[in-house]
Image: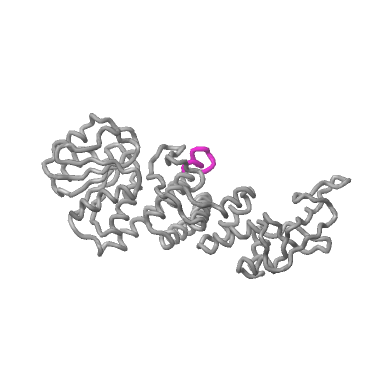
Amino acid sequence: MTDDVSGAHDRRLDGRGGSDDGHVGERGRAQPAAVPVLSWPVGAVAERLGVSTSTLRSWERRYGLGPTHRTGGNHRRYGPVDLQRVQLMVRLTAAGIPAQAAAENVTTMAPEEVARRLGSGGGAAAGIDATGERASDGDSLFGPARSVIPSDQATTDEGTVDAILSAARELDATGLVHLYRQTLRRLDFADAWSGVFVPSLRAIGERWGEGKLGIESEHLASELLQGELRGVVRANRFRVSGTPVLLGSADDEQHHLPLLAVEAELARHGVASLLLGPRVPVRALAQALDRARPPAIFIWASLRRLPTEPFWDLVDGLDWPLVVVIGGPGWPPEVTGTRGFATVVHASDLASAVSHIVPAAEA
């Protein structure tokens, strides 16, 4: 960052060399890093970033996040990289991320990563590719479905993902709940799910798969998030009406967080639903359909399904119009389309699932 900062910057070198990283003296003793051409005192940084000098000094004392250069007169100076780290710290804490969690991540980032996050123009959170693949246990969650988002929001979302990962590592239940709730207050639910919750759970799962995180961390993060998703449903319970749609997972499918996400987003749209949970046998599903006769049903499968399974015989035998929305990578593509009275569509993300269900429920 080379733009001017309020207050005069110090252009003097301290005579020990021109490297930002310092050097080793004649006797092998590490020497202080040289002051870069562009450097700023604490007061100038505080004025530019809108924080107090006491806050900056507190961050330096508690987290080691501060100026790394000193002049020949022993005055502290922030170099360009120091300034960028503090700027990112300010942005993350302003978004509600706890200072300790934000600092732990900011101080360990490479300078290139700090600059990228400050200048990010959008896209999914770090670690998630365009297809939303998860390295550890398959695509068990809806992938991100956002296009271009504001750079400030992208940076904040990535910081929140980092903070959730840190809280899960420390088994910090209070911190996780705070981060989940703060995210739900800050973002629309669909953006909170695709931009923060899914990348967080995937990152936790990947760390577990690599042996860098215990399974207890993944379970804690998942269980607490389930509680917050159900809280969204409860908060909208007086808005829902109409014949409920059914939500369930295929008969041997363990994952059901996507069901909770769909339930929460439908509640926000005023659509009632009955959540049948994971591992719904086809026979039980047939009975539920016959008794409830819903306008739509959502079925999740991350494990591979066959086009010849009994579920499709059930769909083909329906005698009333039904929109069947299937989600997850387990479904074969040839099963979509018109099947008797049913219309089968595949939803690649939360937004598309809800976009198919809501019109059917309101018809």
Query: Can residue 221 be spotted in the picture?
Result: no
Question: Where is residue 200 shown, x and y percent of the image?
Answer: 46, 49
Q: Which residue lies furthest to the right in this view?
A: 26
Asked if one can make out residue 212 in the rendered structure from this viewpoint, the answer is yes
Image quadrant occupied by the C terminus: bottom left
Q: Is residue 247 above or below residue 4?
A: above
Q: Considering the image in quadrants, where does the N terminus appear?
A: bottom right
Quarter of the image for residue 142 reads: top left
x 80%, y 51%: residue: 18
Task: State left or right for residue 110 relative to residue 338.
Answer: right
Q: Specify whether 250 is left or right of 103.
A: left
Task: Name the residue rendered at 80%, 54% in the picture.
Answer: 32
Residue 215 appears left or right of 273: right
- Front-most of residues 296 and 65: 296
The boundaries of the magenta stretch are 205-213
145 to 339, vertically: above or below: below
